[in-house]
Image (tube, rainbow, N blue to C red):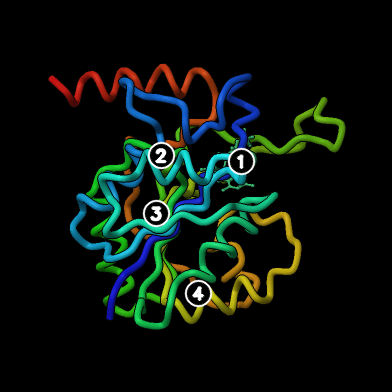
């Protein structure tokens, strides 16, 4: 069976500050979304990419992704990330047994990580996420955020990235049961079904461009790669 990837790219990027929608901002003169789709396609493991575009920029996004015309479909995204993923999932048929979900904002994700996620799902893990150890000491605070109530055991915590990989049927079930939740990733919806989620080693360069600092970091990583 085939493998499809969903790229939620419809967010406005409030934390990045004023400007175009985040997916259309550039790293090294290339839009973030083009970087992200490029890394999925160059993994050589993806047959179809469905992009959930900012609703006002669907035609512009199609134009930007012209070079990937044979593998890319563009649909308008929704008001939340979950809605954007769900709308893109509607455009993926049963012939795609494996579906990845990958944030456009993780522009510089190494293609090898895409391959590792596909491999893990193909091996029988129906939900797979890339994770990294947590570097900082983590404290719990009171509801006011004023006082520390404890220090959390970091050794059993992981920071979660994308691409996340799923057996298509499981992802469909998870989104159907989702209604409106505050889950920030797709694996979280699978967890709500009580189904197992397994992990593979993530990659530092799969970081999400969220703040202006991240954009600065991305420019530096990209410049280094170009050398
Ligand atoms: N996303 C989406 N549809 C939404 C909201 C987010 O497709 N309604 C996508 C973003 O485009 C991004 C990914 O989900 O690629 C991760 O979300 P995040 O980093 O939070 O992006 P934004 O929501 O755009 O940023 P912010 O929260 O700072 O506004
Ligand atoms: Mg957001």
The quadrant in which residue 92 appears is bottom left
- In this picture, is 217 found above or below 73? above
Q: Does label 2 or label 1 sit earlier along the sequence? A: 2
User: What is the count of numbered marks?
Assistant: 4
Residue at image point 16% right, 23% down: 226
Observer-nearest residue: 140 or 82?
82
Residue bearing mark 1 = 56
Distance, label 2 to label 3, CA atoms, is 14 Å
Crowding at dot 2, Cα within 10 Å, few <14 / some 14-19 / many 20+, comes out as: many
Which of the image's four quarters has the N terminus?
Answer: bottom left
Given contact means CB atoms under 8 Å apart, are the residues at marks 3 and 4 in contact? no
Residue bearing mark 4 = 196
Distance, label 2 to label 1, CA atoms, is 15 Å
Q: Residue 33 carries which label?
A: 2
For this orientation, the residue located farthest to the left is 227
Q: Which mark is residue 114?
A: none
Q: Does label 1 or label 4 sit earlier along the sequence? A: 1
Q: Give the label, 2 or 1, closer to the camera.
A: 1
Given contact means CB atoms under 8 Å apart, are the residues at marks 2 and 1 in contact? no
Question: Percent from the top left, x then y, of residue 187?
Answer: 53, 63
- In this picture, is 55 found above or below 116? above
Q: Is mark 4 on a helix, strand or loop?
A: loop
Residue at image point 65% right, 53% down: 78
Which of the image's four quarters has the C terminus?
Answer: top left
Distance, label 1 to label 4, CA atoms, is 37 Å
Residue bearing mark 3 = 163
Q: Is residue 143 left or right of residue 57?
A: right
Residue at image point 77% right, 36% down: 149
- In this picture, is 92 found above or below 139? below
Q: What element carries label 3?
A: loop
Question: Percent from the top left, x then y, of residue 61?
Answer: 45, 42
């Amino acid at each position: 069976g085939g493998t499809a990837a969903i790229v939620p790219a419809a967010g406005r990027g409030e934390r990045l500050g004023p400007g175009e929608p985040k997916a259309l901002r550039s790293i090294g003169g290339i839009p973030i979304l083009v970087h992200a789709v490029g890394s999925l396609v160059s993994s050589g493991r993806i047959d179809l990419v469905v992009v959930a575009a900012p609703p006002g920029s669907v035609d512009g996004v199609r134009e930007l992704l012209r070079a990937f015309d044979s593998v890319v479909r563009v649909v308008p995204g929704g008001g939340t990330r979950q809605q954007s993923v769900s709308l893109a999932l509607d455009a993926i048929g049963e012939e795609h047994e494996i579906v990845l979900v990958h944030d456009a904002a993780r522009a510089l994700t190494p293609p090898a990580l895409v391959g590792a996620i596909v491999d893990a799902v193909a091996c029988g893990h129906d939900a797979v996420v890339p994770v990294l150890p947590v570097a900082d000491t983590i404290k719990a605070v009171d509801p006011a955020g004023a006082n520390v109530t404890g220090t959390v055991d970091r050794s059993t915590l992981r920071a979660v990235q994308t691409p996340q990989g799923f057996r298509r049927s499981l992802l469909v079930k998870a989104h159907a049961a989702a209604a409106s939740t505050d889950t920030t990733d797709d694996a979280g919806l699978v967890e709500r079904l009580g189904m197992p989620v397994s992990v593979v080693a993530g990659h530092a360069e799969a970081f999400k461009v969220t703040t202006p600092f991240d954009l600065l970091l991305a420019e530096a990583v990209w410049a280094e790669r170009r050398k």
